[in-house]
Image (cartoon, rainbow, N blue to C red):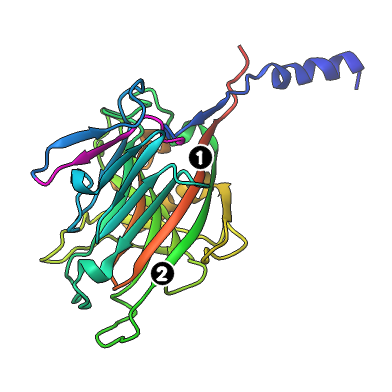
């Protein structure tokens, strides 16, 4: 081929604009504070940096006896926050971590294993990403706009203590899980399925198995605990780490979430979920949930640092 013609053929590729990565998770350094709810359900703001803009991180303590708004168990430090009562622990900017999250379910359940169908304590850090109330708002990219989602965090299990007496224990009912979940939601107001979503996530720790694997199911509830009835797609930790999350050692967790999110979307459609739109351009990452769900009598705590999820957009076509 004529060298000049070869250069001309390559020009469209060279002129394509590579879009920068977009941070899906805001305030990963935990500088802007937290929103918590008091025991009456009213929202309160906890800040350790008085010059910070309003918090993006919310806390949730479903079915727990604890409440982060209880001032008797709070301490504001020069660069963080400490909360610790008999039931739950949350430390922002402890030594060598961005946060520590812990649940003492033995105290929550008063030492008695919960029955199947009973509610269980949660300790979540949450934030809205896209759509109303999200830090990216309505301009957040859709799944069709993305090329990759580079996910990274480091986790260190600090403790997982269980009672020696296992009377009443059931492996299918009792566990301690630390999870990372996105909501993948149809946010196209012109779509019939606007508002519908599925749960995409990774179980980072489960005391019943060293490395969590693919798990897909409907989020069913019970008369005592309402479920969302939405589909859950969880590829497990295996694609993102080469070692288990075990006591006393930092584990590096990283990988591209995007192909797994698309696989979850395909599995939704295959099983009859999200029936009103099969267009990836209608779906965005609308929110994040990160934290503990403890259905057993475990007393657990984990440290986390360097949390990121950067969306790499597809290159823009040449002008």
Residue 108 picture location, percent across and down: 21, 66
Using the image, determine if residue 208 lies above or below residue 237: below
Instruction: Report the magenta residues as a range.
Output: 28-39
Q: Which residue is at a point 28% across and 57% down the rendered structure image? A: 88
Residue 295 picture location, percent across and down: 28, 69
- Answer few, some or many: residues within 10 Å of disc 1's Cα (few below 14, many 20 plus, some between 14 and 19): many
Q: Nearer the viewer, residue 231 or 289?
A: 289
**Does the rendering let one see residue 216?**
yes
Residue 160 image label: 2
SS type, badge 1: strand
Residue 45 picture location, percent across and down: 23, 32
Q: Nearer the viewer, residue 86 or 37?
A: 86
Q: Which residue is at a point 91% across and 17% down the rendered structure image? A: 3
Q: Are marks 2 and 1 in contact (CB under 8 Å)?
A: no
Quarter of the image for the C terminus: give it: top right
Instruction: Work out whether mark 2 precedes mark 1 in sequence or the reverse, and give the earlier one.
Output: 2
Quarter of the image for the N terminus: give it: top right
**Does the rendering let one see residue 273?**
no
Residue 231 image label: none
SS type, badge 2: strand
Q: Nearer the viewer, residue 312 or 77?
A: 77
Using the image, determine if residue 108 lies above or below residue 88: below
- In the rendered structure, does residue 70 fall within the stretch colored magenta? no
Using the image, determine if residue 40 lies above or below residue 129: below
Residue 172 picture location, percent across and down: 32, 77
Q: Report the residue marked by disc 1.
A: 308
Query: Which of the two discs, 2 and 1, sits closer to the camera?
Result: 2
């Amino acid at each position: 081929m004529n060298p000049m013609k070869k250069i001309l053929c390559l020009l469209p590729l060279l002129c394509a604009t590579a879009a920068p990565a977009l941070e899906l998770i805001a305030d990963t350094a935990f500088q802007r504070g937290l929103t918590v709810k008091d025991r009456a359900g009213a929202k309160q703001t906890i800040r350790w940096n008085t010059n910070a803009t309003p918090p993006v991180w919310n806390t949730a303590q479903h079915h727990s006896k604890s409440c982060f708004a209880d001032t008797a168990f709070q301490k504001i430090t020069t660069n963080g926050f400490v909360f610790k009562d008999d039931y739950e622990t949350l430390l922002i900017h402890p030594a060598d971590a961005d946060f520590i999250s812990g649940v003492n379910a033995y105290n929550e359940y008063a030492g008695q294993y919960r029955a199947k169908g009973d509610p269980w304590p949660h300790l979540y850090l949450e934030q809205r990403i896209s759509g109303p109330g999200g830090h990216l708002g309505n301009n957040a990219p859709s799944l069709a706009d993305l090329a990759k989602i580079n996910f990274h965090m480091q986790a260190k299990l600090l403790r997982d203590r269980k009672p020696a007496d296992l009377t009443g224990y059931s492996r299918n009912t009792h566990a301690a899980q630390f999870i990372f979940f996105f909501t993948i939601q149809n946010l196209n107001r012109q779509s019939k399925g606007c508002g519908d979503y599925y749960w995409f996530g990774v179980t980072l720790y489960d005391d019943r198995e060293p490395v969590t694997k693919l798990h897909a199911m409907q989020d069913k509830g019970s008369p005592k605990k309402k479920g969302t009835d939405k589909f859950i797609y969880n590829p497990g930790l295996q694609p993102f780490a080469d070692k288990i999350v075990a006591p006393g050692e930092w584990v590096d967790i990283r990988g591209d979430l995007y192909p797994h999110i698309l696989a979850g979307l395909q599995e939704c459609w295959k099983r009859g979920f999200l029936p009103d739109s099969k267009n990836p351009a209608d779906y965005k990452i609308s929110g994040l949930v990160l934290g503990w769900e403890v259905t057993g009598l475990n007393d657990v705590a984990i440290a986390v640092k360097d949390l990121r999820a950067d969306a790499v957009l597809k290159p823009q076509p040449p002008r």
